[in-house]
Image (cartoon, rainbow, N blue to C red):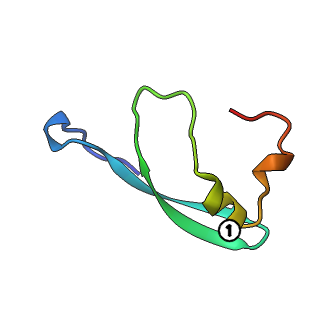
Amino acid sequence: MSYSFDPKHGLVVVHAEIFGPFGSIILSLALDTGATGTMINIAPLIAVGYDPSLAPDRV
C-alpha cells in the first residue's frame, strides 16, 4: 500500500484494523511520518479483548 504525500493536504489519516480474542475493529489513525511508535486509545483495545492494565510496560 502506498500514498502520495502532499503537505498542503494536511493531516494524513489511515485506516487500520486490530484483531483480538473477541474480534476486530477498524480504527482511523493519524499518520506521523516521524514517529517511532503507535498509540491506541484503551477503549478499542478492551473492545477486542485486550486488557492494557495487565501489560508489564505502559507508556
Farthest residue to the bottom: give it: 23
- Type of amino acid at the residue the image marks with label 1: Ala
- 22 to 55, vertically: above or below: below
Residue 58: give x, y in percent of width and height: 74, 35
Residue 25: give x, y in percent of width and height: 58, 68
In the rendered structure, the answer to whether residue 40 lies left or right of residue 3 reads right
Q: Which residue, given by chain and number where applicable, does mark 1 sit on?
A: 47
Badge 1 element: helix
Residue 48: give x, y in percent of width and height: 70, 67
How packed mark 1 is, by other alpha carbons closer than 10 Å (few <14, some 14-19, many 20 or more), is some
Q: Residue at x 68, y 64 (%)?
A: 19
- 22 to 31, vertically: above or below: below
In the rendered structure, the answer to whether residue 46 lies left or right of residue 30 reads right
Write down the quadrant of residue 20 in the picture: bottom right
Of residues 24 and 3, the one drawn nearer to the viewer in this rendering? 24
Write down the quadrant of residue 51 in the picture: bottom right
In the rendered structure, the answer to whether residue 47 lies left or right of residue 4 reads right
Q: How many numbered marks appear?
A: 1
**Which quadrant of the rendered structure holds the C terminus?**
top right
Residue 42: give x, y in percent of width and height: 65, 53
In the rendered structure, the answer to whether residue 14 lies left or right of residue 23 reads left
Q: Residue at x 50, y 61 (%)?
A: 27
